[in-house]
Amino acid sequence: MAETLVLGASGRIGRALRYRWGGEAALWQARRAQTGTGWAIFDPLAEPDALRAVAAQVRQILCLAGPVPGRGGDLRDSIALGAAAVRAGAATGARVLLASSAAVYGSQPGLLGEDLPPAPSHPYGVAKAEMEVQALALGRELGCAVCCLRIGNIAGFDAILGGWRPGFRLDRFADGRSPRRSYIGPLSLADVLAELCARPDLPERLNIAQPGPVEMGALLAAAGRAYATAPAPDTAIAEVALDLGRLKALLAPQRLLPAADPAQMVAEMALLEPHMKD
């Protein structure tokens, strides 16, 4: 029997997981009928009884459900979805892993560790930060273990590779480089999440990325996608780098977290692309 219920499994991360893990590896939730087996079709917010019934069949809930920036929808729905997952976990004894975002850190400088107070600068980050606060508080109140996964940029699902169009332009900083961000390949993310789901104990907050910030220009170059540059405005952020010490310690010694490599990330994206059609 599957041990994990994946909420929001019809989204991009969910489809990457289903491709990498296999359809029998989890119970997969969507709001509309999907092809293949192992799907549970219901709305987690409108049908809490259905959510509890399916959660009773598993050991943990991985909540990927929530609005995506730039795709419409109320960004604050992620707060309600996180709370719904925690209530279902508390009612059934399942622990909860919530997909959060590195956006909760905002524009803070230096290596960004999980104990650093959030300082989001955009509505998406604000909503994710509030989701974390409310879900963790509710988990403590109801006796449900909760882990908030602060995921960095996902190659191919981001605004750079995923949002590329002819005429694309990147900021260029005084050192000649384009913005640098903590990234992870989509299949590497699936592997990391599989490892975390197998771990008995997880912290309340956990950064998810591959070691070493990636220059956005290098990522586009690896994909063979042309781009122009323009001087970065004063408000532009040169680097967002996640502290991955906690993640590395959790994965070791079973899994070595490979350094972020643009060519490998592009290769992962190419493997996954045929399975990402809407």
Image (tube, helix red, strand yellow):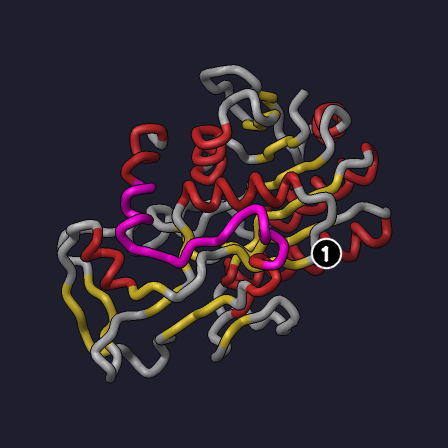
Residue 57, relative to residue 215: is it above or below?
A: above
Report the amino acid beneath label 1. Gln
What residue is shown at x 14% (from left), y 52% (from top)? 166
Looking at the image, residue 263 sits to the left or right of residue 138; the answer is: left
Q: Give the x, y percent position of residue 153.
A: 42, 56
Q: Give the x, y percent position of residue 231.
A: 21, 78
Q: Nearer the viewer, residue 195 or 111?
A: 195
Q: Which of 28 and 110 is in front in this view?
A: 110
Q: Name the residue under label 1.
A: 134
Quarter-of-image position of residue 35: top left
Which type of secondary structure does the marked residue at label 1 adopt?
helix
Disc 1: CA contacts within 10 A as few (<14), some (14-19) or many (>=20): some
Is residue 257 rendered magenta in the image?
yes
What residue is shown at x 62% (from left), y 29% (from top)? 43
Q: Quadrant of the N terminus?
A: top right
Q: Give the x, y percent position of residue 217.
A: 23, 63
Looking at the image, residue 231 sits to the left or right of residue 254; the answer is: left
What residue is shown at x 74% (from left), y 43% (from top)? 86
Q: Quadrant of the C terminus?
A: top left
Residue 113, relative to residue 227: is it above or below?
A: below
Residue 128, relative to residue 18: is it above or below?
A: below
Q: What stretch is highlighted in magenta?
A: 249-269
Quarter-of-image position of residue 197: top right
Q: Give the x, y percent position of residue 204.
A: 70, 57
What residue is shown at x 55% (from left), y 27% (from top)? 31
Q: Nearer the viewer, residue 165 or 110?
A: 110
Looking at the image, residue 73 sits to the left or right of residue 202; the answer is: left
